[in-house]
Amino acid sequence: MKVVLTGAAGFLGSHLAERLLRAGHEVVGLDNLLTGSPANLEVLRRYPGFRFVQHDVVEPWPDLGPVDAVLHFASPASPNPRSPLGYPNLPIHTMRTNAWGTYHGLEMARQHGARFLLASTSEVYGDPEVHPQREDYWGHVNPVGERAVYDEAKRFAEAMTMAYHRKHGVDVRIVRIFNTYGPRMRMDDGRVIPNFIVQALRGQPLTIYGQGEQTRSFCYVDDLIEGIVRLLFLDAAPFPVNMGNPHEYTILALARLVNDLVGNAAGLRFEPAMYREGDPKRRQPDITRARNLLGWEPQVPLRAGLQRTIADFRQRLGLA
Ligand code: NAD
Ligand code: UDP
């Protein structure tokens, strides 16, 4: 199979590309390296089936020849306004990447009769009023709130994907990804697990935004990629599928676990909440659909996944 994968230099994109390359597929990676890393590309370049095209997916796409699947993973993904790489600081880019990028990807899929898979997000549920979140929940998003540039862009991307399915019969997949972590995550993009691991390895207190009572459910990257690959190769699934780990933790519990695993005695530092409003208070996927459809559920417990991630960060920070 020949796959075009946007965001291939990023965290999830590089893991997905590697998994497909290992299985003998051909992967053309499109990325503008905004938040992705050349080191991730080095890993992929070891495989003869990989080709990289540096390209901003907002612009019309180059002709890449016949293609069997288009997987759209390019997008800033960190909500942290304190990081220059967080989408609040890349608001128009984020909206264009998810709107124009999705459009160009769907057009390529339509022209070649290819399958299209969209990396969507739990953020389509916003700050949810229903818990845990099932795919038939329509969400609670403030269209003019601080996170809207991402949430609404992903909602638009989902709507566009379904429009191509209904109008042109494109064979589409939508994965609603819940917080996923693991090796190769960018250390400075401001998401909670990289922040905590880097702080702990440097012997600094971990920054808790607010009181740390908000919850998230963290999925190890290998589990997520397994689910995505199963969905990609399923015969038909023109509807969203949640993917994430249903075990829910408070941010406080996560911080204590990271300090414990690293042996960091510097403790915690409480800082103002990340947003005045809109930082989701609770988030947990209902993965019944993925279980029934794909026989999939996460296998890697948080402690084990964090240990692997800490080892990777140690190495990249030159501490191993
Ligand atoms: P990442 O920042 O590591 O990867 C994103 C990649 O997209 C980067 O390589 C970046 O350079 C590239 N990119 C951004 N804008 C681009 C553009 N206009 N043209 C070309 N390339 C562009 O983030 P990630 O965690 O790997 O996220 C990948 C996808 O998964 C994103 O669409 C994100 O919204 C989605 N997602 C991730 C998570 C998670 O927990 N990691 C959760 C929900 C959804
Ligand atoms: N957070 C935190 N300290 C940090 C970074 C994040 O307490 O250094 C919190 C943040 O306020 C949010 C949660 O951790 O409630 C998860 O944040 P992340 O940026 O990883 O992604 P989100 O799940 O909000 O999309």
Image: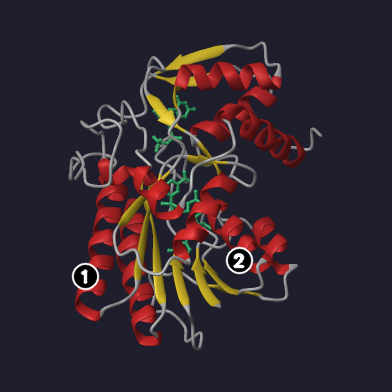
Which amino acid, by three-letter code, is at mark 2?
A: Leu
Q: Which residue is mark 1?
A: 163
Q: Which residue is mark 2?
A: 20
Q: Is residue 122 left or right of residue 78?
A: left
Q: Residues within 10 Å of mark 2 (few under 14, many from 20)?
A: many
Residue 21's image quarter? bottom right
Residue 141 % position (x, y)? 20, 41
Name the element at disc 1. helix
Q: Residues within 10 Å of mark 1 (few under 14, many from 20)?
A: some
Q: Residue at x 40, y 86 (%)?
A: 112
- Residue 291 visible in the snapshot: yes
Q: Residue furthest toward the right?
A: 320
Q: Is residue 118 left or right of residue 131?
A: right
Viewer-proximal residue among 86 and 312: 312
Residue 87 % position (x, y)? 39, 47
Viewer-proximal residue among 170 and 306: 170
Residue 210's image quarter? top left
Residue 9's image quarter? bottom right
**Which numbered disc flags the more N-terminal residue, 2 or 1?**
2
